[in-house]
């Protein structure tokens, strides 16, 4: 009696189906086993087939205690790509970044060209503004006044001269635009012979003798200006500027020479010196002062338009000076010019 006799009908049917299916699988796999029996993977294939048959038998024949035996063969695990995986390649990213860099360079180039064009227009306007201010018909003095010819003993006060020049009579404005080059006209000699009293007063001004000839000449001119001997200061400072054009204090000297004329009530003679000092070295120690004093000279000449041009250039070129050291002077000149 075979194993199906003592089973109920449903169990006999499942058993028969399982036996038939197992026989079918074995019959199907037999040719494959026969063909690969001699191959290197025959043992692995045989074990896999046996595992599949056992799994099928467990599903068809549950355990005697009613337990269900899960198959040992499981479906292959499929991997899915995580969302957000970049679809572009490194080369595509690099090309995109290069396009962005090129666009930025084009924008910067355009801005640079616009700025250069704007500066060129300002320079042209200032060149036209400064040209008429050049004095004409002046004669170059042969020498300094006779009263200033007698130096006295050396003093240590020469080093304080540049600092004392920092505070001109007028209020200070911000940086200014570039101006066309204009060579100052030669200064006029002292019109009348100085009186004996003036000569004596000038002789009391001590000319330093520190061993630095250039510094001594400038310091002496500063002392004359400080004592309000403006014609003598003009002669002395012109001597210094002509003789020592490369001196470290040349920016102080040209600016002070312009101040000597301006304080003497001669704005037309002062303007070219202020302009020359600014153009010769825009980073010079007194270039901002000269540009501001140029605006003041134009104001005194009644040329508001050119004065406002110089004042605007000062505000643009020297914003730090306009907000700090020369702020008071700048505010005063701007208020007097009433620039729009």
Image (cartoon, grey):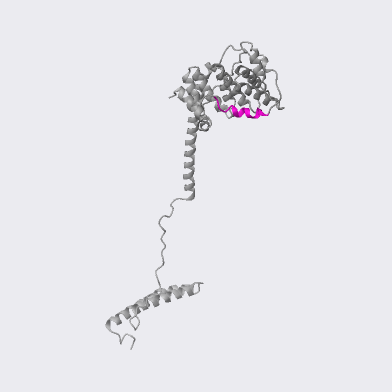
Displayed quadrant of residue 81:
bottom left
Residue 154 at x, y percent in the picture: 70, 26
Question: Could you tell me which residue is drawn at 49 percent across and 43 percent down?
Answer: 98
Position of 157 compared to 68: left or right?
right
Residue 206 at x, y percent in the picture: 67, 23
The answer to whether 261 is drawn above or below residue 24 in the figure is above
- Span shown in magenta: 156-168
Q: Main secondary structure of the magenta part?
A: helix
Closer-to-camera residue (294/110):
294
Does residue 319 appear anywhere in the picture? yes
Residue 52 at x, y percent in the picture: 40, 74
Residue 331 at x, y percent in the picture: 48, 27
Q: Is residue 333 magenta?
A: no
Closer-to-camera residue (286/151):
151
Q: Residue furthest bottom?
A: 1
Q: Quadrant of the C terminus?
A: top left
The answer to whether 115 is drawn above or below residue 46 in the figure is above
Question: Could you tell me which residue is drawn at 49 percent across and 50 percent down?
Answer: 90
Q: Residue furthest left?
A: 9
Closer-to-camera residue (285/26):
285
Position of 9 compared to 334: left or right?
left
Q: Quadrant of the N terminus?
A: bottom left
Does residue 143 appear anywhere in the picture? no
Closer-to-camera residue (340/76):
340
How many numbered tags mark residues here? 0
The answer to whether 2 is drawn above or below residue 213 in the figure is below
């Amino acid at each position: 009696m075979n194993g199906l006799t003592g089973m109920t009908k449903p169990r006999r049917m499942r058993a028969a189906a399982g036996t038939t299916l197992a026989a079918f699988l074995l019959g199907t796999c037999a040719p494959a086993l026969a063909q690969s029996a001699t191959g290197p993977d025959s043992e692995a294939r045989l074990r896999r087939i046996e595992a599949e048959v056992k799994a099928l038998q467990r599903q068809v024949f549950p355990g005697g205690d009613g337990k269900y035996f899960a198959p040992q063969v499981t479906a292959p695990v499929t991997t899915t790509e995580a969302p957000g995986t970049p679809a572009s390649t490194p080369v595509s990213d690099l090309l995109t970044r290069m396009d962005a860099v090129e666009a930025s360079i084009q924008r910067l180039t355009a801005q640079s060209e616009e700025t250069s064009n704007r500066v060129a227009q300002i320079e042209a306007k200032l060149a036209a503004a400064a040209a008429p201010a050049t004095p004409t018909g002046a004669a170059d003095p042969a020498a300094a006044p006779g009263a200033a010819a007698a130096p006295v003993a050396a003093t240590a006060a020469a080093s304080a001269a540049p600092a004392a020049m920092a505070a001109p009579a007028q209020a200070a404005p911000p940086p200014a635009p570039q101006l066309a080059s204009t060579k100052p006209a030669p200064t006029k000699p002292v019109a009348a012979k100085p009186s004996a009293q003036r000569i004596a007063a000038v002789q009391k001004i001590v000319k330093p003798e520190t061993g630095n000839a250039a510094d001594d000449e400038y310091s002496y001119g500063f002392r004359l200006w400080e004592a309000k001997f403006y014609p003598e200061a003009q002669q002395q400072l012109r001597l210094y500027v002509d003789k020592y054009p490369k001196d470290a204090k040349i920016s102080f000297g040209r600016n002070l020479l312009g101040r000597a004329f301006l304080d003497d009530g001669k704005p037309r003679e002062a303007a070219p010196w202020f302009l020359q000092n600014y153009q010769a070295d825009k980073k010079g120690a007194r270039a901002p002062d000269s540009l501001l004093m140029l605006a003041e000279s134009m104001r005194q000449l009644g040329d508001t338009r050119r004065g406002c041009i110089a004042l605007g250039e000062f505000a643009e070129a020297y914003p730090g000076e306009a907000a700090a050291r020369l702020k008071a002077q700048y505010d005063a000149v701007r208020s007097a010019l009433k620039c729009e």
